[in-house]
Amino acid sequence: MASAFFSFEPYDCGRVHDVQAPLKNCETNGGLTKGEETQLFGSEDWGDLDYICSQYASYEDSIPRKEVILSDEEDQQQPFSDFGMLDDFQFIIDSPPFQAPDESVTLDSVLTELSDFVEPKNERQYPTTLGSLELLNEYKSGYNKMNVGRINENHHEPCKVVDDQRLSTEEVMRVAGAQYIQFSVRNDDHLSMLSHPFSCAFSGLGREETNDVELASLLLASAEKIGNQQYDRASKLLTQCAYLSSSTGNPVQRVSFYFAEALQERLNRETGRISFKGGKKGRQRMEFGVAIDFEEGQMTPSSAHLECHQKIPFCQVLQFPGVQAIVESVALARKVHLVDLGIQAGIAWTVLMQALAARHECPVELFKLTGIGTDEQEIQDTGKRLANFAESMGLPFSFKAIIVSNMDDLKEELFDVTEDEAIAVYSPFVLRTMLTRSERLDSLMRVIRNLNPCLMVVTEIEGCHNSPSFFNRFIECLFFYSAFFDCLEACMDRNNQNRITTERHYFGQGIMNIVATEGEERTFRHVGINVWRAFFARFGMVEIEFSHSSLYQANLIRKQFACGSLCTLDMNKKCLTVGWKGTPLHSLSVWKFH
């Protein structure tokens, strides 16, 4: 089964997920042992930060404000009032040795071994059989309700109260999977599901939940019929899905709306009515870990992006421990060079600048930032904002933009590198965009290795959406995006225009591409951390464990969000995974070459 190669084990919703479990040892005193690590900076050293926030559409106005009560053993610090969440994060120094690069390797050798999830150019199509339902059966086994606590009411940012007794969006899909398997085993006509009574196992569901389960069951049946090329029956089922789903309804109706739309597109393609909704060619940028097509003039940070950054914990929970890892790796370097493989607004680097500017024992002589991207104007604007910010901090700073149409154009000679600088590489949701072009990924990794960085921080989607089996890929994608839509339901109002935009243009486009397209046209390909481990090992890369300080940062950030109690943090070996109600959605890992 394709999912076995991903080591993607569905979470058991019958138990409570202790989101602090992997991080409990980091709670006390910031997870630090006195004498081992030292505090790097205090807020009294910070300059005026008002202007940098104003560049991001009043970014600071809606960042959740907070008060953190420190233990008696911790230094009390006066919070800096103008930069919200950044006040309480204290970056710690620890300097590991530099590592030398290893011999060259190509991605093709990895793809050969892992061919079930990184598809060959001539993709094989598999019919949907009862054997394909094994993956769905794994998910349905955990449909029991998760006992999640209510949102902490002490947060300044209000959050809708989550009904403890209601099923989450993903749990609805699990229940639907269980019902769907029952009908499949009996070979029932799935059109009868709307009038068929539920088994006693589901008799405790309310009316809305029952309707949601029926809708999800129809969605699964539609996907199976398309996979088996039973287009007439699929068309009838999709008509029912279109009637019951809504882009402005509850989260199950909303996610079903976009999956039904994608299934209809796939049906149209396979029956000759091609509209190519899922395979638009054009300029792309990364938003929430997804490559999004934009028209000219739309390549600036959107209000939807900013509001999601402020209200949804994922971005910041991933950024802060990554910054902490970089701070530790360059602790003894007087010249620091950061290479951002997918720079956007650069908000995270203001945090790094604060840490570097506050160093007294080993002051930074120069902080160099190289930003890589496709839109020159946007990157130059980011560079100007960061330069102004660095000047206000008294931090020597230089910025270089490297504009490339694709990673084939990225060459070692484009970088201004000196022998006396410590180089760190940051890869924010970049590598997965090159899975369809293995030669680009090979080329990029060779360039990075030749730069001889002391550290590489990698953030990626933790998903399994690259199976050659359409139905397996559909199931994995459905549960993944169900968790995302459930997150938006908890963090944003249903009529919030930025939420609607996020669902339509960001998540909806990803669903369309994964479900409706095949071959090179399918550019949204997500693989899990175990796949990246196998690939990085071929380049002699070694995964580094996060410090207690880094994990403490992640847990502290999570708590600052109104809905942060539903954001789950877990450790997959040395990798930090960030998810929603136990479903992993993102991964953060740190690597060194040796």
Image (cartoon, rainbow, N blue to C red):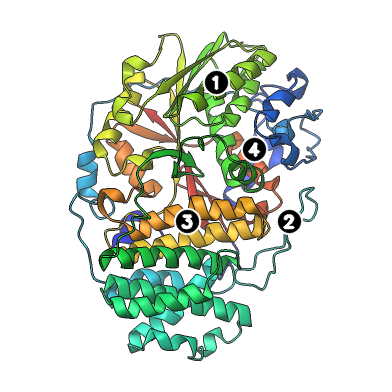
Alpha carbon of mark 3 to alpha carbon of mark 4: how far?
40 Å
- Sequence-wise, which precedes: disc 3 or disc 4? 4
- Sequence-wise, which precedes: disc 2 or disc 1? 2
Relative to 308, say whether 235 is above or below: below
Residue 261, percent from left and from top? 43, 65
- Which residue is disc 2 drawn over? 159
State the residue at coordinates (36%, 16%).
414
Alpha carbon of mark 2 to alpha carbon of mark 1: how far?
35 Å
Q: Which quarter of the picture shows residue 210?
A: bottom right
Alpha carbon of mark 4 to alpha carbon of mark 2: how far?
29 Å
Give the SS element for disc 2.
Answer: loop
Q: What amino acid does circle 4 point to?
A: Gly
- Sequence-wise, which precedes: disc 3 or disc 2? 2
Count of numbered circles on the image: 4
Q: Residues within 10 Å of mark 1 (few under 14, many from 20)?
A: many
Label of residue 508 in the image = 3
